[in-house]
Amino acid sequence: MGWEGYVALGFAVIFLSIALSIKSGIVRGLSLLYSVAFLLFAGGDYVGQYSKPASYMLYLLSLSFFAITFFYNYRFRHLSRKASLKEYIDPLAGTGNRLYFEEVVKAEVESMERLGIRYAVIFIDLDNLKAINDTYGHERGDEYIRLTGKVIKENLRIDDMVARYGGDEFVVICSIRSCGEVLSIVGRLEEGLEGLRGETSMDYSFSLGFACYPDEGRSFEEVLSLADKRMYNNKLKKRNAKTNSPSV
C-alpha cells in the first residue's frame, strides 16, 4: 500500500474517533461517512496491487461516499444559516417559529433519517396560558412565553432544535444515541421550567411528552404524534389530580 493509502487510513481512524466521541448526532453521522469514504480509498490503494478492477470499484465507492458526505454537509450548513434568518424567529419566545418548523426542522429531520441518525421529539405545552391572559392580561401572558422560550434554549445543546409550534406549544428535536439519552435532556428541561415557578408570581405550569425515532415510530409524523399524545395524557393526569384532590 502506498503513502496515499496510509494517509487515507489515518483520516479514516481520525473521523471514526470523532464519531465515537462526539455527542452531536449530525456531526457523528457526517464523521462516519467521511471515515467510510477514506477507508474505501485506503482499501482501493491496497487491493490495487492484486486486482485493478477491484481497486477501481473501491475508488468509485469512495468517491460516491465523499459526494454524499459533501452534499449533506452543505445541506446542514445551509439549513443552519436559514435558521438564523429573522423570518424564522418567533418574536416573543426567541425560538424558531412555525415557519421554521415547517421549512427548516422538517428538512433537517429528513436528512437525519437518511443518515440513520436517531432523534427524539419533545412536546411542551403551557397548561394555563389562557387563564393567565384572562387574569393578568396579555402582557403577562407574553412574559410567560418569553420566559419559557428562554429557559428551553438555555437547557438544550447547540445542535438541538426548538420551535414554537402553536400559541402555547413548543416542539424540541434533538439527536440521540439511544432513547434513554432523552431522559437527561427532559430532566434538564423540567428542572429549568420548574424553576420559573419561583421567578414569577404567575401560576406557572407545563406538561411534557416525548417519543423517539426509530424506536417508537417509523416516521417523523408518527413520533411527533406520539409525543403530542403523551403530553396531552400528562396534562389530563394533572388536571384530574387537581380536580380529585380534597379541598382544604
Image (tube, rainbow, N blue to C red):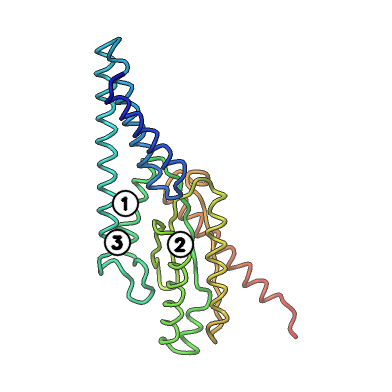
**The N terminus, quarter of image:** top left
For image coordinates 57% across by 56% down, the residue present is 183
**Closer to the N terminus: mark 3 or mark 1?**
3
Q: Which residue matches tag 1?
A: 107
Mark linked to residue 83: 3
> What is the quadrant of residue 3 in the picture?
top left
Element class at badge 2: loop
Q: Is residue 25 left or right of residue 191?
A: left
Q: Residue furthest top?
A: 50
> What is the quadrant of residue 103 in the picture?
bottom left
**Closer to the N terminus: mark 1 or mark 2?**
1
The local crowd at label 3, few if under 14, some if 14 to 19, many if 20 or more residues have their Cα within 10 Å, is: many
The local crowd at label 2, few if under 14, some if 14 to 19, many if 20 or more residues have their Cα within 10 Å, is: some
> What is the quadrant of residue 71 in the picture?
top left
**Nearest to viewer (mark 2 / mark 3):** 2
Element class at badge 3: helix
Real-space Cα distance between discs 1 and 2?
20 Å
User: Relative to 193, does residue 17 appear above or below in the rendering?
Assistant: above
Residue 90: percent from left, percent from top? 33, 71
**Three-letter amino acid code at the position of disc 3:** Ala
The local crowd at label 1, few if under 14, some if 14 to 19, many if 20 or more residues have their Cα within 10 Å, is: some
**The C terminus, quarter of image:** bottom right
Mark linked to residue 156: 2
* Most foreground residue, 187 or 214: 187
**Three-letter amino acid code at the position of disc 1:** Ala
Mark linked to residue 23: none
